[in-house]
Amino acid sequence: MSISLANKIEKFGTVLFVLLFTVMSEILTAFMNALLSIIFWGKISLDLLYIGSIDALIVSVVVSSIGIYLIRKNANLATINQRILDEMKAREQAEEERERLIAELQKALAEIKTLSGMLPICASCKKIRDDKGYWSQIETYISKHTDAVFSHSMCPECAEKALKKFQAFKKT
């Protein structure tokens, strides 16, 4: 059931209650005045019934006014309550989105490994010196400090040099 339909049903119930209360107070007041009239004078006094009806009418108007005021306040409170619920839902969604983004950024930050700055490298063997002063193969150093993986092969120039050395070795 939608909230607006529930509000309409609730308002109708409140109005119905006020009307029933008004009718019941009129009937009760008339009955009480008739009873008092019979007790005191032995007959029903129309004046007393008339005065009682006016009193009941005044009470009914006051109660109806209060009822209408409460109905309007209830409608305003229902509207405000719905706005608050909508705002809470929007804030919860924003909080979930923020948490998701933070987790995503933390994951990305954890995966990032970069090399920066100047790396001391041997001009002859191409080993790299680490922060502790140890020399490592360039492949080992880069693998430890990044997510890079190496596969070895030979460039055409080195392959030609190696082939010449192999052929020279084979001749001897």
Image (cartoon, grey):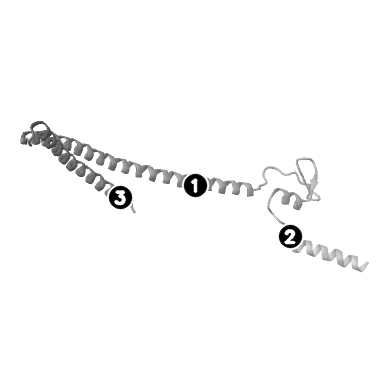
Q: What element carries label 3?
A: helix
First along the sequence among labels 1 and 3: 3
Three-letter code, disc 1: Glu
Q: Which of marks 2 and 1 is in front?
A: 1
Residue at image coords 17%, 43%: 23
The front one of 154 and 83 is: 83
Percent x, y of residue 101:
53, 47
Mark 3 residue crowding within 10 angstroms, few (<14) / some (14–19) / many (20+): few
Three-letter code, disc 2: Ser
Q: In this view, does 136 lie to the left or right of 104?
A: right
Three-letter code, disc 3: Ser
Task: Report the residue that reaches farthest toward the top.
Answer: 40
Q: Which mark is residue 151?
A: 2
Q: Which of marks 3 and 2 is in front?
A: 3
The front one of 170 and 101 is: 101
First along the sequence among labels 3 and 2: 3
Q: Is residue 36 left or right of residue 135?
A: left
Q: What element carries label 1?
A: helix
What residue does disc 3 label? 4
Real-space Cα distance between discs 1 and 3? 28 Å
First along the sequence among labels 2 and 1: 1
Mark 2 residue crowding within 10 angstroms, few (<14) / some (14–19) / many (20+): few
Percent x, y of residue 167:
87, 67
Q: Is mark 2 on a helix, strand or loop?
A: loop
Residue 132: image quadrant is top right
Residue 74: image quadrant is top left
